[in-house]
Image: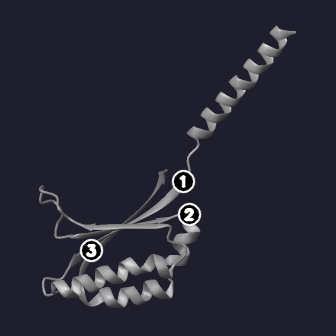
Amino acid sequence: MKFKLFLAAGLLLLGTVAFTSYDSLKTKKMLRHVVLFKFKDSSTPQQVKEVEDAFRKLPSQIKEIKSLEWGTNNSPENLNQGFTHCFFVTFDDEAGRAVYLPHPAHKAFGKVLGPHLDKVLVVDYWVQE
């Protein structure tokens, strides 16, 4: 009887470990929206800061934005081709991005950005969390 109980406990433990291992391998997909800006030479630091501040407000205005990271280029390679700012927006899915793109808050941000923008580069991709 002790052997059967020991065997049952062992199988239960093995099944729990296997199930846990499988769950730890499953990951959540996320959609990343990377935006790079090159500002006009005529844009002042204060105007660029206004653009930064306006972009940083978007997550509080658009609930589909799950996270936002941003920063300015500091690469020593000098390969940025004039792009100085990177904004890294995360969505759960394409539906979230579809809400974000025409959203009135995003459109309002575009009006703040527009007069200072020389070039923009956008790349979207799926990642595993």
Q: Position of residue 55 (x, y in %)?
A: 36, 79
- Tell me the distance, in whole angstroms, between the alpha carbons under discs 1 and 3: 26 Å
User: Which quarter of the figure has residue 89?
Assistant: bottom left
Question: Mark 3 — residue?
Answer: 37
Label 1 residue SS? strand
- Colouring rule applied to residues: one colour
Answer with left or right where residue 63 lies relative to residue 82. right
**Between 121 and 4, the one nearer to me in the picture:** 4
Name the N-terminal-most of marks 3 and 2: 3
Circle 1/circle 2 CB separation < 8 Å? yes
> Which amino acid type is shown beneath numbered disc 1?
Lys
> Which amino acid type is shown beneath numbered disc 2?
Asp
Q: Residue at x 12, y 55 (%)?
A: 77
- Tell me the distance, in whole angstroms, between the alpha carbons under discs 1 and 2: 8 Å
Within 10 Å of disc 1 (Cα), the crowding (few <14, some 14-19, many 20+) is few
> Which amino acid type is shown beneath numbered disc 3?
Phe
Label 2 residue SS? loop
Q: Position of residue 54 (x, y in %)?
A: 35, 84
Name the N-terminal-most of marks 1 and 2: 1
- Tell me the distance, in whole angstroms, between the alpha carbons under discs 3 and 2: 24 Å
Q: Position of residue 3 (x, y in %)?
A: 81, 8
Q: Quadrant of the N terminus?
A: top right
Q: Which mark is residue 93?
A: 2
Q: Which mark is residue 104?
A: none
Residue 126 in sight: yes
Within 10 Å of disc 3 (Cα), the crowding (few <14, some 14-19, many 20+) is many
User: Which quarter of the figure has residue 64?
Assistant: bottom right
Within 10 Å of disc 2 (Cα), the crowding (few <14, some 14-19, many 20+) is some
Question: Mark 1 — residue?
Answer: 29
Q: Residue at x 26, y 74 (%)?
A: 37
